[in-house]
Image (cartoon, rainbow, N blue to C red):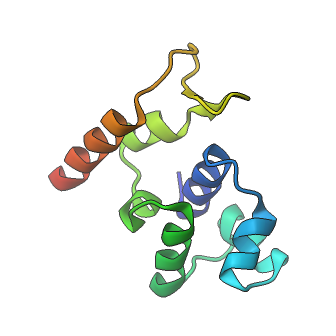
Amino acid sequence: MNIGDNIKKIRELKNYSQEYVVQELGISQSTYARIESGTIVPKIDRLQRIAEILDIDVSFLLSTSNVFNLVFNATANQSGYITNQSNNVLDIELLRQIIREELEKV
């Protein structure tokens, strides 16, 4: 998973449109699409701004850990609950704690 994939997954889980993020960043739609596709890698200041918009720590955007992939390969169902592929409701705060602990190991 690359940075663009991480951004896209988190944006989708938060139910944010590309248009919303583009507006908040003040960049073109095509530039943002290239970020999500991995065609371009944003500089750290833009990554930090994306993390702020998504209300996450920038380290989540850079992570390739298995725990991150487990969490952010989840999908958001229509009621807004984050569920994994077996449709179990995940406790997002617990998952954040697990991710923090995993990132500290790196």
Task: Report the quarter where the C terminus lies.
Answer: bottom left
Give the side of residue 44 with respect to residue 83, left or right.
left
Q: Percent from the top left, x then y, of residue 60?
A: 41, 57
Which of the 4 image quadrants contains residue 76?
top right
Q: How many marks?
A: 0
Looking at this view, name the residue that lies furthest to the left. 105
- Residue 45 position (above or below residue 64): below
Report the front residue among 98 and 40.
Answer: 98
Return the x and y of residue 3 as percentages of the image width and height: 53, 63
Frontmost residue, 37 versus 75? 75
Q: Residue at x 55, y 62 (%)?
A: 54
Q: Position of residue 52 (x, y in %)?
A: 49, 71
Which quadrant holds residue 35? bottom right
**Which residue occupies 71% across, 62% down?**
37
The residue positioned farthest toward the front in the image shown: 79
How far across and down, in percent of the image, does residue 58 sit? 41, 67
Above or below 78: residue 54: below
Location of residue 6 by image quarter:
bottom right
Identify the residue at horizontal 54%, vertical 58% (top origin). 2
**Residue at x 25% of width, y 53% of height:** 103
